[in-house]
Image (spheres, helix red, strand yellow):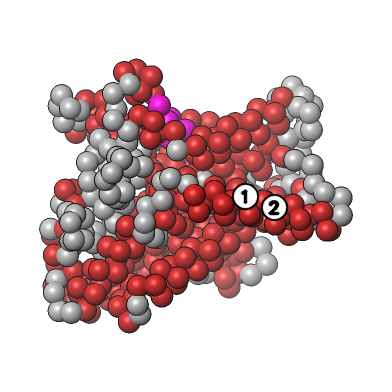
Amino acid sequence: MRIPATTRGRVLAGLGMAAVVIFFLATVPFHRNWFDLHVYYGAVKHWIGGDPIYDYLRPGTHYGFTYPPFAALCMLPMALVGWHSALAISQLMNVAAAAVVIHVCLAATIRRESRHRWFAYAVAACMLALLEPVRDTVSFGQVNLLLLALVLADCRLLAAGRERFPSLGRLAGLGIGLAAAIKLTPAIFICYLLVTRRWRAAGVAIGTASGATLLAAWVAPTASRTFWTEAMWNTDRVGSLSYVSNQSWQGMLARLTEPFAEPSRAVWAVGVLLLMWLWARRARQAVAAGDELAGFALTGIAACLVSPVTWVHHLVWLIPALAVLTDKGLRAAPGGRRRRRLLTWALATYAILCSSMVWLWRWNDGGAPGFLGANAYVWIALLLLLLLPLGGPGTDGDGPYAESGPSATMGTCAHATASPSKSVPVSRLSEQPASPTRPGSKPAPSGSGG
């Protein structure tokens, strides 16, 4: 994109982009009518009135509250305000979370590549808003962006702990622990800290998650007992595994076998073990290369694949991978094959994640092409897990091009702490050269647990 030469031109271009995005978001046919926020709001109202929170079902549906009790405690303030106030607060929190995500993922890339930073941030914000996972998170009233922001804050803390603010580094793990106490999926980032031998951060994350869970058990013992012994295991509350919105490994298996049979648990388990082995191997490589954001990105990808249910709005966990692809492509030699390849890959992935294409096969009746299309986001996640570039760009026949080092970009959130046998000393790193829905029916809900 050619950037306007004058400030006035950039302001007009920014306003024009924002107007187009707002118009699209206001008219897009896949708006979810705040379904999950209605569930949260109704559940806490139900609970504050003296009824068990996990007995609540949204009227006319079989969807209820599926998060741990600590999440319910965090959402209790909604019971003190009206519906429209709760909706407004939810959207403001999403905007703040999106700002954190953009900053952590792209701040250094923008500093390095753009002379007009505010304009680059405006473009990034507009592009983020068009992603289907982000649109669904906002229109469902979901919490995914908030959880992503909490987790990525720890990426920043890990880098800050080694760079300018060592005292802040001691807080690394706090965001992951809180996110894991609110929803189970982010707990995989605790595994990431353990696999990459960040013992202190892992301890902080485990302690935070455990403390929040124990606090909830002390405040709401009945709800805690119900969740951990009953509600967590009740898969009927989250919806059909074969529904096209479930873009996980298990969702793909369910679409492959249903309606003829249930997906094989053994096949699913073997696939999960292989995916986790690949993730652990590549995550250690990322940290050994000083590429923290890539490690976080790989972990988010793995979470989407191995979770039994990954609704489309959960795919916000792929956003860091898009940032890594873009950053690595822009670092590559101008005009080189690697630059073209990585930026083309990033653009194609972004376009597919904006397209809502999986809904073209929501009835799962398109044969082999339908199976490929209905699982488009699964294929994207698998490719990213296998091939996401790590560390410095190196060379690929187009001539050398430099990596700017571990602290030059939040696009790598570099962290050179001790990691498995291949960790890179800080002294050596510093020597590197700088450089939808069925017609007529309710929106396909995520069950508010998704």
Q: CA distance from mark 2 to mark 1?
A: 6 Å
Q: Which residue position is annotated with label 2?
A: 16
Residue 9, picture quadrant: bottom right
Left or right position of 9 against 25? right
* Closest to the observer, 256 or 245: 245
Left or right position of 3 against 81? right
Q: Which residue position is annotated with label 1?
A: 20
Q: Position of residue 308 (x, y in %)?
A: 27, 42
Is residue 335 part of the magenta span, yes or no? no
* Closest to the observer, 46 or 289: 46
Please name the residue shown 35% across and 45% down the image: 311
Residues in magenta, as a range:
373-380
- Are the two marked residues, 2 and 1, in contact with CB atoms closer than 8 angstroms? yes
**Name of the residue lying farthest toward the top:** 368
**Amino acid carrying mark 2 in the image:** Gly
Determine whether 423 is above or below 382 in the image. below
Mark 1 neighbour density, 10 Å: few (under 14) some (14–19) many (20 or more) = few
Please name the residue shown 61% across and 69% down the image: 166
One can see residue 276 in this view: no
One can see residue 256 in this view: yes
Mark 2 neighbour density, 10 Å: few (under 14) some (14–19) many (20 or more) = few
Q: Position of residue 217 (x, y in %)?
A: 21, 73
Determine whether 244 is above or below 55 in the image. above
Element at label 2: helix
